[in-house]
Amino acid sequence: MSGVEVFLDETPGEVRGVVVRDGRFDRLLIDRDSDTPGHRLGARSVGRIVSIDAGMKGAFVDLGAPEPFGFLPLRKGDAVAVGRKVGVEVSAEPRERKGPTLRLIGAGEGEPRLLSPAPSMAERLARLAPGVEIRTGAGALRASMEAGEEALAPGGLFAGLGVTLAVERTRALVAVDIDHAAAPGRDGRRDKGRANRDGLMQAARMIRLKGWGGLVAVDLVGTGHDGAAMLAAAKAAFGEDPEISYGPVNRFGVLMLSLPWRTTPVEERLLGPAGRPTVEARAIEAVRRLGLALAENTAAPYLTVRCPPAVAAVAEPLAARLGPRARVKADPALTGGPEIDEG
């Protein structure tokens, strides 16, 4: 598959998969040791119906794991009742303190429990980029860190494309603003069309990278658009997934579409409610940086990562899995990110 690179970062405590297309990060997948296995995308379980919400047209399901319960959307004719056992598969991972969304696969027997785990990270990457060699080692660690930084960014200036893009998520929708500075002496209408096509491609990439879904509103450059051309550009950018719903461009130059939720958003993985990295995320990042330093410096007998005491307490057992050259030191005076020392 030309122009595609795939990386697997197996840092203790967290596994990341990264897909790069045409030199830009396209996907960042994250699995943590602390995840509930039955809540991961694709996991199959026996569940027990604990309540039915007619207003939400669904049922809450005990999967034999800590709450929150899973939510099972019901179709007309689905025969379910409180207490009934069902076989389900996770179709969307937890988000916003809600449990996973489930898909009914049949009747269930026995106590609520995990039947089959979700696909491994390597299997997920192989599905996203079939036939592409999965790269590991120092290059994968660097790609993982860079992808994480970009996934948390609100947008960017794509100078080579002449496009400035802002992508923000609210509780109601994902808002995308495409801006373009017209070049003197050029065909403005043609430039706007190209800017919108390029902007849609980058917006779709950033939304995939962030792991977002739901309603998306794209504020295109200019007005009076060729609706058919913009719809074709949107489909080229976001894909032909049958679960994606596309709307027309309205008279204000806004394109609406709806994307399926699949994974927990990256910011919910890496940041706490206050928008700052959690202690767990900081500890894993410290261990990741230590792992990269160990891979790049093979001469030092051992390397030490210094971090604040609360972070060090979580990082120490994870770093032990890197081998005898890895050390962790609690540094009460350190207020910033982790620091690596020789010896």
Image: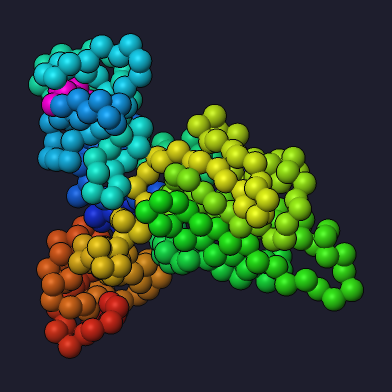
Q: Which residue is drawn at 34% across and 47% down?
A: 264
Q: Magenta segment, which residues?
A: 45-50
The answer to whether one can see residue 14 in this image is yes
Specify whether 209 is left or right of 120.
Answer: right
Residue at the extreme bottom of the image, as rendered: 333
Q: Residue at x 23, y 49 (%)?
A: 97
Question: Relative to residue 296, is residue 39 depicted above or below?
Answer: above
Quadrant position of residue 269:
bottom left
Residue in front for this viewpoint, 323 or 150: 150
Indicate the colouring scheme: rainbow
Residue at the extreme front of the image, as rendered: 251
Residue in front for this viewpoint, 287 or 51: 51
Specify whether 294 is left or right of 280.
Answer: right
Residue in front for this viewpoint, 325 or 16: 16
Specify whether 238 is left or right of 301.
Answer: right
- Image coordinates of residue 147 in percent, x first then y, are 46, 61
Q: Which residue is drawn at 55% across and 35% down?
A: 245
Q: Is the magenta stretch mostly helix, strand or loop?
A: strand
The answer to whether one can see residue 89 in this image is no
